[in-house]
Amino acid sequence: MKIDSNQRLTELDWLRVILIFAVFIHHVLMPFNGDNWHIMNNESSKLLDDIMVYFEQFRLPILFFISGAGAVILLSKISAKKFAADKLLRLLIPLIIGMLLVVPPQSYIENINQYQSYWQAYPSLALNFSTNHLWFIEYLIVFSLLAIPLNIILNTNTSAKVFKYIVELTKFKGGLFLFVGLLIAIKISFSLWFPSDDNKIENLSSSTYYLFFFITGMIFVANKHLWQRVCEHRFYHLMMLLISTVFFYGYYYSPDLSAYLSLNIRWSIWWLVCCLVSWSALLTILGYAQFYLKKTPQWLRLSNELIYPFYIFHQTVIVVIGYYIISWQTAIWIKAVALFLSALLITCGICLFIIKPFNTCLLYTSDAADDLLCV
């Protein structure tokens, strides 16, 4: 039984805004965690890095899950042809414009000592066609096109039989958590075969990992009972998240095990505990969001409409502003607060006063809350 396509999933409205804002905070803090980002403060905080690495495990996976859910909802309203055209229009064109106009300032700041001026550097930076933080949109383009045949498969009689089995399995509290076994297998096997930490779409260790969350988003929203189970078993999933967190930090802070375990084994254990956290966090956050976040206030609707351009512009604003802020001779927390406030103000200003009034580059849509693939 499918979720009614006209039913408003308000939890997704909330989670989309919350998670993109979490991405914004993450990037604001990156110059101060010692992780060799685009710009780095001279002084760094190990504690900050230890905290940030935890939230990295589920922030983007949940966004891909939401996008997968959005694909099924949208495909239930419009034809596959219109869906494909809409996604290419809303995703590909902004991606190209972003690579030409939004990404180059970041690359310039990162290598500012190599150039005499931004305008002298711009041609080479623009022709580099780097996606940078916009790799998320590149993934969504590919995943959106894959969603069309996947949605057809989800509507077959064979899939209906599989759904029936899964629904029966999820009557037990641990049923939904069993999906993590497949996630672990995908993450470890592809990461061993494609040992790269970049986010290029051709890097299958990254793309298959996020594709798993996109597809599970499609599967969960395609069946009303599965969606309900997430809410019903939310407390159990919270307990699994707490246990997974103990395993995660237990291994994270473990002593050097190189004398006892090979490098591949050590990495495999790390990927395993990361998957445990990412999947249990997704189930927990989605379950409690379903239970508590049942209304979409007007400010949240506006935020959903502008969250796409906010995502596109936020990192460039952070890098450019942050380059000057990190040169201040003051404490880390003062710099971080200053960067947070200034970057938030400027990025919101771009969205409200440039994108929204002029509907620039298809980045703004008054009905974006119904188009979950816009982020």
Image: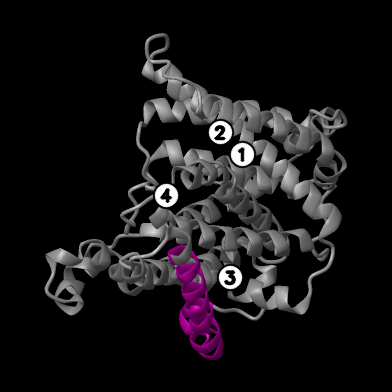
| Alpha-carbon span between mark 4 and mark 3 | 26 Å
Residue type highlighted by circle 4: Asn
For the stretch drawn in magenta, what is the main secondary structure?
Answer: helix
Question: In percent of the image, x 83 and y 38: which residue is there?
Answer: 235
Q: Are marks 4 and 2 in contact (CB under 8 Å)?
A: no
- Specify start and end residues of the magenta stretch as a single range: 335-363
| Alpha-carbon span between mark 2 and mark 3 | 27 Å
Q: Earlier in the sequence, mark 4 or mark 3?
A: 4
- SS state under label 1: helix
Picture disc at residue 22: none
Q: Earlier in the sequence, mark 4 or mark 2?
A: 4
Residue hosting label 2: 274
Q: Earlier in the sequence, mark 2 or mark 3?
A: 2
Residue hosting label 4: 33
**Where residue 20 sits in the image (x, y, percent)?**
58, 61
Residue type highlighted by circle 2: Cys
Q: Are marks 2 and 3 in contact (CB under 8 Å)?
A: no
Would you say 278 lies left or right of 350 here?
right
Picture disc at residue 278: 1
Nearest the eye: 225 or 309: 309
Residue hosting label 3: 307
What quarter of the picture does the C terminus occupy?
Answer: bottom right
Q: Are marks 1 and 2 in contact (CB under 8 Å)?
A: yes
